[in-house]
Amino acid sequence: MEFEESPQEAVVREVMEEAGYVVEVGDPLAIHHFTRPEWGRDGRPYKSLRVVFHARITGGQLGTTEVNGSTDFAEWIPIVDVPSLQSRADIIDVSLAALDRVG
C-alpha cells in the first residue's frame, strides 16, 4: 500500500497491476496479522497486517500489467483446486477459511 492510498485504493491498483482487472472493492472478508520478534529487513521486530476484501471485476482482462514487479503471470484456478496446490501463500488459507465461515 502506498503512503497516500486507502486500503481500498491499494486493492484497485494492485489488482490492475498484478491481474489486469478493474475491480469494485467491497467489504473486508478477513483480517489477519502476525508478528516476527526477530525478523525484518533490518533485523528489527516485524508486524504484518493483511486485509482481504470482497471485490467484483468490472473491466479489464486477465494479464499482468506490472513493470519490473514481483508478479510473473496471473491465471484463474478453480477455487475447489486451490487446497491441492503445492505452493501457495498462507493468506490464501486464511481467505479460504473466511469464505467457509460466511458460507
Image (cartoon, rainbow, N blue to C red):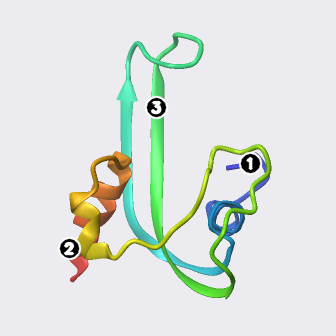
Q: Of the residues shown, which amino acid type is indicated by label 3?
A: Lys
Residue 90 in the image: x percent, y percent?
33, 47
How many numbered marks are there? 3
User: Element under label 2?
Assistant: helix
Residue at x 44%, y 17% (from the top left corner): 39
Residue that carries the numbered disc 1 in the rendered image: 2
Q: Of the residues shown, which amino acid type is indicated by label 1?
A: Glu
Q: Of the residues shown, which amino acid type is indicated by label 2?
A: Asp
Q: Is residue 67 left or right of residue 62?
A: right
Res 88 label: none
User: Element under label 1?
Assistant: loop
Q: Are marks 1 and 2 in contact (CB under 8 Å)?
A: no
Kindly report the distance in space between the C-alpha atoms of the residues bearing marks 1 and 2.
31 Å
Split into 4 quadrants, where in the image is the C terminus?
bottom left
Kindly report the distance in space between the C-alpha atoms of the residues bearing marks 2 and 3.
26 Å
Q: Earlier in the sequence, mark 2 or mark 3?
A: 3
Q: Are marks 3 and 1 in contact (CB under 8 Å)?
A: no
Residue 45 in the image: x percent, y percent?
46, 18
Q: Earlier in the sequence, mark 3 or mark 1?
A: 1
Residue that carries the numbered disc 3 in the rendered image: 47
Q: Earlier in the sequence, mark 1 or mark 2?
A: 1
Residue 66 in the image: x percent, y percent?
75, 55
Q: Nearer the viewer, residue 46 or 94?
A: 94
Residue that carries the numbered disc 2 in the rendered image: 100
Residue at x 71%, y 61% (from the top left corner): 17
**Residue 21 found in image quarter:** bottom right
Q: Is residue 80 left or right of residue 27?
A: left
